[in-house]
Amino acid sequence: MPNKSTRIGGASGYWGESAMATPQLLDAGVDYLVYDYLAEITMSIMARAHAKDPAAGFAGDFISAVLKPHGQAIAAQGVKVIANAGGVNPAACGEAARALIREQGLNLKVAVITGDNLLGERDAIAAAAPTEMFTGAAFPDKEKIASINAYLGAFPIARALAEGADIVITGRCVDSAVTLGACIHEFGWSASDHDLLASGSLAGHLLECGPQATGGNYTDWEDAGDISNIGYPIGTVSADGSFTITKPEGTGGCVTVGTVSEQMLYEIGDPQAYMLPDVVCDFSNVEIVQTGPDMVRVSPAQGYPAPDHYKTCLTYGEGFRGGTYMSFYGFDAARKAQKFCDNVFARANRILRGHNLGDYSETSVELIGAESQFGDYAEVNEPREVVAKIAAKHSEAAAIGILLRELTGLGLATPPGLSGFSGARAKPSPIVRLFSYLTPKDAVTITIDVDGKKIAFREAEGQAFDPAAITRPQPPQTPDEPDATVTVPQIQLAWARSGDKGNKANIGVIARDPAYLPYIWAALTPESVAKRFGHFIEGGADAAKIEKYYMPGSHAINFLIDAVLGGGGVASIRNDAQGKGYGQILLAHPVTIPAALADKLDDQKGISR
């Protein structure tokens, strides 16, 4: 077994992604295809669809765009398929898959894993009234709840594979579980193999967002080349937990230390306590090395025993939101746009009062191309073109409808330069908020249905996690200031990737060269980062809302910023409600380095000095 390995292709990162990955990865030759379709908002959308139609509530494109056109090739090549395409209705997804398999005359066994969907226990959960695990907020009105799902792990998937399943369909599991389940099955890893489970989870974390590991969303984006034909990632995982990341030959994109490091830091909090149902992961000492063109080797991670609870995410409705984008160009474009937005709200507010609807609970105006994204650090000199994003929240859909009507109704009274491209007028949409809490593992009943054979699965109990057990690495020593220095934007010294964690945002910063890291560490203090994002943080530039973590293995820093996304997801009316561009803001942060070290920058990417 020490030399055994398995090839796993990451074929989907979200519901609605391009269908190009499956044939590409089948042609490249893989043992497993894994698909991640779900996010918290996706669950609420599927829950609403299921409420209208009992046969709906799953990712239909898994059937229509994966199994229907490629089922014959999957069967012929003996490729195993694992997907959380079940959404809130994995049984219906499984039946659709089985019907298609019968229609095509294939010999493929389908397993369906259920137990994550706790919506049927809503009343009992509401009576227990757990508080929100991050903010301490009270339990929401149970009548407004759209979905409740515990995040299951990988061991049920491994058991389904052991029962002979060729296709495994789950509801809500953690994103990386579709990969880890394959590894557990292939290598016989047990619940006590904490380091191996953490390593397999890291492989899954790198594959779960598809081409984000192969040049998508990459700081050095031009290196990705032909993204119309971007390659999807393949992880070749070994029994010792190490693995390589590559992509199919002849495809666009790139696999580099930068692309893989960025994805490792994407959407994580404490890198030494990345909590999953099967293991608590420590990524701090993971090393990432280029071993060839478009091939990167990742060393094993470390792990702690699994927690004794499942993270459980509940979504609920909280009124409505709406807005749109309008552009202005010419002289004084920003001032014209601001005046337009101010007067739209003035007119809409008068109508609200006339209908006794009350004020908007939150409004937002962002002038994109002016100073809205970079705050006090924007370097804009009388822009000649801006896009005004204007939005609001209200408890009543009618109030949002009034705003959207006045946005277009003021069109003939505006300052000059109004323009835009649109079809039908925007409509009010529900605000869906996220509420996270913990469910004891023994309170969740998991069932595996392998073509009619039903197996009750019992999860290992786990144990309470003790953060005091973590040994934190010593941070880089603050360098002595040399006689001659050069100040450069951070993009010349580092890669960065950002994402959302509810109403928090994380920003991972990876030094292009280990020699740069002490200077980056010294420059990026909680205070300086808070100041740079003060226009986004609720309450202003509060350094207490910044957590800073050191990852010596990858020469990286991870920042976690609290209360910075205006609620996050579709609860937010921000232009960037998921913090996807926050890394770009931090890459403009100045860093002072010795003049002698600046010679290394000549061959680096980024803004010219």
Image (cartoon, grey):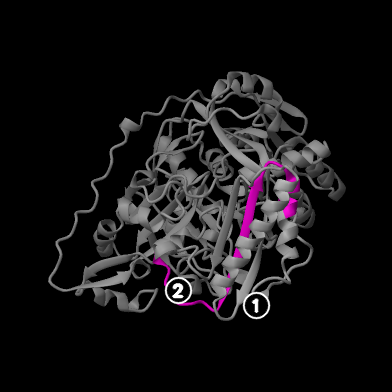
Dot 1 crowding, Cα within 10 Å, few <14, some 14–19, many 20+: some
Q: Give the secondary structure at mark 1.
A: loop
The image shows residue 305 at horizontal and vertical percentages of: 42, 30
Query: Which residue of the protein is positioned furthest toward the bottom in this rendering?
Result: 330
* Residue 218: in magenta span: no
Q: Which residues are magenta?
A: 377-402
Three-letter amino acid code at the position of disc 1: Pro
Query: Which residue of the protein is positioned furthest toward the left in this rendering?
Result: 483
Q: Is residue 339 above or below residue 176?
A: below
Distance between the alpha carbons at the discs numbered 1 and 2: 21 Å
* Residue 385: in magenta span: yes
Answer left or right for 302 relative to 77. left
Residue name at image x 58 percent, y 27 percent: 139
Q: Nearer the viewer, residue 24 or 239?
A: 24
Q: Nearer the viewer, mark 1 or mark 2?
A: 1
Residue name at image x 72 percent, y 26 percent: 454
Residue name at image x 46 percent, y 29 percent: 307
Q: Which residue is mark 1?
A: 416
Q: Which residue is mark 2?
A: 380
The image shows residue 250 at horizontal and vertical percentages of: 59, 72
Answer left or right for 398 relative to 175. right
Q: Give the secondary structure at mark 2.
A: loop
